[in-house]
Amino acid sequence: MYTPKFIVSLFVGILIDQMKITFAAPFLALASAAAAFSPSKFTQKFSSTSARHMSYENELGVIAPTGFFDPLGLSKDIDQETFDQYRVSELKHGRVAMLGVIGYVVQEVYRFPFDIAPGVPCSSIPNGVAAIEAIPALGWAQMFFLIGAVDYYGFLGDFELGKPDLDPEELEKRKLNELQNGRLAMLAILELLRHDSQNLVSPGFDGLDHLITGLPFLYE
């Protein structure tokens, strides 16, 4: 079984102001949950060789104020199929990051009422990156194989249950919302892990009593 502590321990990083990110990301992640549609092709494929020289400046996700943002040139001289693979990867990483941000919030106020390994209740595992050393090998093994099986075999697949019947315009809007929320969540989880890791090395360096300072009502 997953634990909130484990989910957030999967990512590493550094970036952006913690107050803004920790306050905004959980709500945006929750708002995008309804838009968690299965990855699909966002544009028509082209079979000709000219597809390798096409522009992607009008693809879904190109919005103000950044516009078309590709400083590394990853979209240069690639065909539509390769671009679609990149987009599916971006969606998947965004969804995992949204779960990670939510997990960071949930662990502050809740623990699962079972043992992550025999004799090791979830309530005994510390929050955030400190959980990496506290989780026993058996706990890591069950999570590793479960996540691997889901990713490899695609057990979760396409969620038909609860999927709304939307018109094309609204569907496109929901897809854009999910994409943008996933991008913000990736920045958010990176900053949460950076801040949490620094606090683990230098406890109390920030002079704060809690990690999620943007949501003080969690601790009331």
Image (cartoon, grey):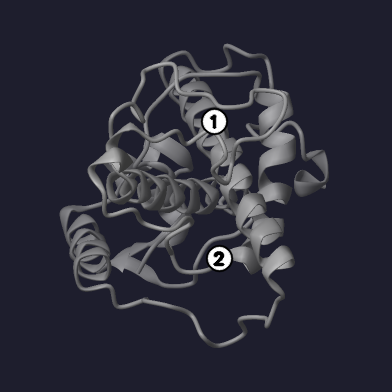
List the residue tagged with mark 1: 187
Side of 21 relative to 5 (left or right): right
Q: Nearer the viewer, mark 2 or mark 1?
A: 2
Give residue 140's quadrant in the image. bottom left
Q: How many marks?
A: 2
* Along the viewing direction, whichever of 135 and 76 lies nearer the viewer: 76
Crowd around label 2: few <14 · some 14–19 · many ≥20 (10 Å): some
Residue 57 rendering spot, x and y as whole percentages: 53, 33
Quarter of the picture containing the N terminus is bottom left
Q: Residue at x 72, y 29 (%)?
A: 64
List the residue tagged with mark 2: 36
Crowd around label 1: few <14 · some 14–19 · many ≥20 (10 Å): many
Residue 26 rendering spot, x and y as whole percentages: 67, 47
Residue 72 rendering spot, x and y as whole percentages: 37, 18
| Label number found at residue 73 | none
Side of 21 relative to 44 (left or right): right
Above or below, 49 against 153 in this view is above
Q: Secondary structure at mark 1?
A: helix
Q: Secondary structure at mark 2?
A: loop
* Along the viewing direction, whichever of 193 and 203 lies nearer the viewer: 193
Q: Residue at x 36, y 20 (%)?
A: 73
Q: Residue at x 36, y 50 (%)?
A: 84
Above or below, 82 against 17 in this view is below
Give residue 114's quadrant in the image. bottom left
Residue 191 rendering spot, x and y as whole percentages: 53, 26
